[in-house]
Amino acid sequence: MPNSVETALRLSTPPDRGEVVEVADGLLWARLALPFALNHVNIFFLEDADGFAAIDTGIGDEATKEAWLALLDGPLRGKPITRLILTHHHPDHMGLAGWLVDRLGVPIHMTDSEFFFAQHLAHNAEAVDVEGYQDFYRRHGMDTRFADIIINQGHRYKRTITGLPWHYRPVNDGDRLNIGGRELEVSTGGGHSVDQAMLLSRFEGIFLGADQVLPAITPNISVLAISPDADPLGQYLLSLSRISKEIDDDVLVLPGHRQPFTGLHGRTAELAHHHEQRCRIIEEACRGRALTTAEVRPFLFNRELDPHTMSFAFSETLAHINMMVRTGRLTWESDGAILRAIAA
């Protein structure tokens, strides 16, 4: 097994546009720009027969198409893409899949839940604009005018996808993929997305963790209007616990954003602690008074937010509240139209 600490230090500088960094033999790292505050996404290439399997695609915009062309004509020249492994359905990770499949004629691999949710976004305009989102925001105390702004502007990124083929090759938790002679164990987890796929090479001590475990920043954990009573934060914390039990601490983590890092167990503990601290803030804010999600949100996110970031902040606030209601730390009060949380 390579020295993962030394490797992480070597990988502290990300690749420039159109370039790759070799993480290990036959494993390349590229970085693509995103048009948000989180301004990049990492994608990886695994040597596969006479070409490379790609892990994620970036968002479906013109800048990403140009970046892919620079990669295909540059460091990947002469090495065809053999398949696309899409970790989850968020547009910054699979938004360019349709364009790449049309151009390269390659299959996609996804978990079942992620594939069907991606199809829901790709082919159902109501997934973004439906009146149900207005009802969802209003029921949790958001001003109608601001709810319309979030739907029309903050949800715009959900449209930055180039479609998907109607068929796919499923990957499931516990599967073992052989890619170019490298055995990769598939592990899935919910919370950030419905059933995100992560890949582990035990022999090399490399964990492709997608967005489940990120350094320096916390993955967004959101409640969606399609399932307003869901508990994604509870699912996420269970996933973190499982990761820390089943994957060695000294692996090199290759995340979906930011730089590769080591110290997996310490990071999962930090993430769990972060969310418990957020729950305590909410518990104190709701002690002796009932507050809507919109009223609780500034206790967690008290800076000025653009519509895109506000949609994440609002839905993450509700994720904490929903878990606290499920575990008995909060209860809902309702006047029939608006829900307010109060400490139990």
Image: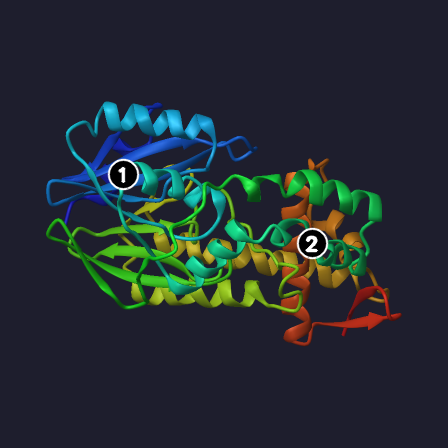
Horizontal side, residue 255 vs residue 73: left or right: right
* Label 2 SS: loop
Q: Name the residue under label 1.
A: 104
Residue 139: % across, % down:
80, 61
Horizontal side, residue 38 vs residue 241: left or right: right
Total numbered labels: 2
Q: Which of marks 2 and 1 is nearer the N terminus?
A: 1
Q: Which amino acid does label 2 sit on?
A: Val
Q: Quadrant of residue 332?
A: bottom right
Q: Report the front residue among 282 and 131.
A: 131
318 relative to 71, above or below: below
Q: What residue type is labelled 1?
A: Leu
**Spatial distance from mark 2 to mark 1, Cα to Cα?**
34 Å
Q: In which quarter of the image is residue 153?
A: top right
280 relative to 101, above or below: below
Q: How crowded is mark 1: few (under 14 residues within 10 Å), some or many (20 or more)?
A: few
Q: How crowded is mark 2: few (under 14 residues within 10 Å), some or many (20 or more)?
A: few
137 relative to 60, above or below: below
Q: At 49% across and 32% down in the image, what residue appears?
A: 34
Residue 2: % across, % down:
16, 45
Residue 209: % across, % down:
35, 51
Q: Name the residue under label 2.
A: 130
- The answer to whether residue 43 is visible is yes
